[in-house]
Amino acid sequence: MQLSIIIVNWNAGSQLAEVVSSIEKYHHGLMSSVVIVDNASTDDSLDRVETMQDLPFKPLIIRNSENLGFGKACNLGAQQAKGEYLLFLNPDAALYADTLPKALAFMQDPANSKVGICGVQLLDEAGHVSRSCARFPSTVGFVAHAVGLDRFFPRLGHFMAEWDHAQTRQVNHLIGAFFLVRRELFNALHGFDERFFVYLEDLDFSYRAGQAGWRSVYLADAQAFHAGGGTSNQVKARRLFYSLRSRLLYAFKHFSWMGAFAVLLATLLVEPLSRSALALMRRSWVGLKETWAAYGMLWRWLPQWVLKGDTR
C-alpha cells in the first residue's frame, strides 16, 4: 500500500469514471488512496464516479468552489494522500495491467534510489506512442517555438519530438499526465509552484528536482493510456493564453534577464504574427480568432503582472 493516486478534474465527463475504473481493475493492491480534486466542474463527471458500484476503495473527493488551477489542486490532493509515492494522473489517462507494478518496482529498486520522478510510455487511442518527454527549455528553444522554427528543426525546441520513445532512458522532463513522484522529493520541493495556473508547473517541478540532484526516468517497458488534450480542448483560446502566460513565468523564473526579455519580445511581437500566418495558410478562421482572443487575454494580464505581481 505504498502509492496514492491524485487526479485533478475539471469537466472531464466520462473520462473521469473511465480512469477510476482502470484503477479499480489494475491497482493490484499497491494503492493506499485515491484523491480526486475537482476544480468547480459544472458537468456530471463527479456524479458518475460517486454512483460507481462496488469499488474496492472509496475515493476522497475534494470539491473546490472555484477553479484553482492544476498545480494548486495537485498540492491540495497531495496533502490528503497517504502513500510513500504520489502518482499524478490525468483524467484523460488510464492504467493498464502492468503499469503500476512495473513503475513501482523500478522506483523501489535500490539502484534507482536517486530517481525522483518516473514516467511510462503513453499510448493514444490508435495505439501510437506519444512523444511525452522534453528537454529543459532554453531561451533559444522558446524563441524558436515562438517563431515557428521548431516545426522545421525539432531539436531547437524542448519537446523531444524527434525521438521515438522506444527505449528506457533518463530525461530532463516527463509529461504530467502520468507523473510518479517520491513523496520525499515532493515535500522537499514544497510541491508544484502555484503561480503556474496550468501548463509548465510539471516542467518547473522537474527542473527544480534536477537542480536538487534527483533524476527523471522514462520507462519504455511500462505503458498507460493518454488521450491527450483532455478537457482543455473545450477552451482552446484560454488554453493558449495559459500556455503563453506560463512560458513567460517560466522564463522570468529560470532564465537570465536578457534571456527572459528575449522570450517576452518573441512571444508578444513575433508569435501572434507567425500563428496568424499559419492559420491563414490553413484557411482556419477559427484558429485565427482563437489566436487573437488568447493574445487579448495575455495583453490584459500583462499590466496586472508587471504592476501588481499577479501571476494567476
Image (cartoon, helix red, strand yellow):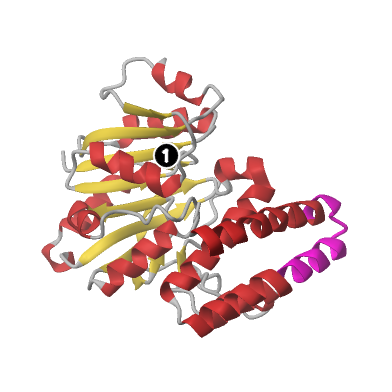
User: For residue 276: magenta?
Assistant: yes
Q: In this view, does 56 lie above or below 201?
A: above
Q: Residues within 10 Å of mark 1 (few under 14, many from 20)?
A: many
Q: Residue at x 25, y 55 (%)?
A: 186
User: Furthest-left residue in view?
Assistant: 110
Residue 46 lies in quadrant = top left
* Residue 31 screen position, x and y as percent: 22, 37
Inspect the image, locate mark 1, and give the three-letter code of the amino acid beneath it.
Val
Residue picked out by circle 1? 8
Residue 168 appears in the picture as rendered? no
- Could you say where residue 173 lies in the image, as x and y percent from the top left? 40, 66
Within the magenta stretch, is there residue 231? no
Is 130 displayed left or right of 62 in the figure? right
The secondary structure making up most of the magenta span is: helix
Compared with 133, 135 (above or below) is: below
Give the secondary structure at mark 1: strand
Reply above or below: 150 against 165: below
Instruction: Estimate the x, y position of residue 90 in percent, counting from the top left.
Output: 44, 43
Residue 155 to residue 180: above or below: below
Residue at 46%, 38% in the rendered image:
91
Q: Quadrant of the N terminus?
A: top left
Whether residue 297 is visible: yes
Residue at point 47% right, 67% down?
250
The part of the chain drawn in magenta is: 271-287
**Left-right relation of 286 to 89:** right
Residue closest to the eye, 33 or 267: 267
**Which image quadrant for residue 284?**
bottom right
The single residue placed furthest to the front in the displayed view is: 307
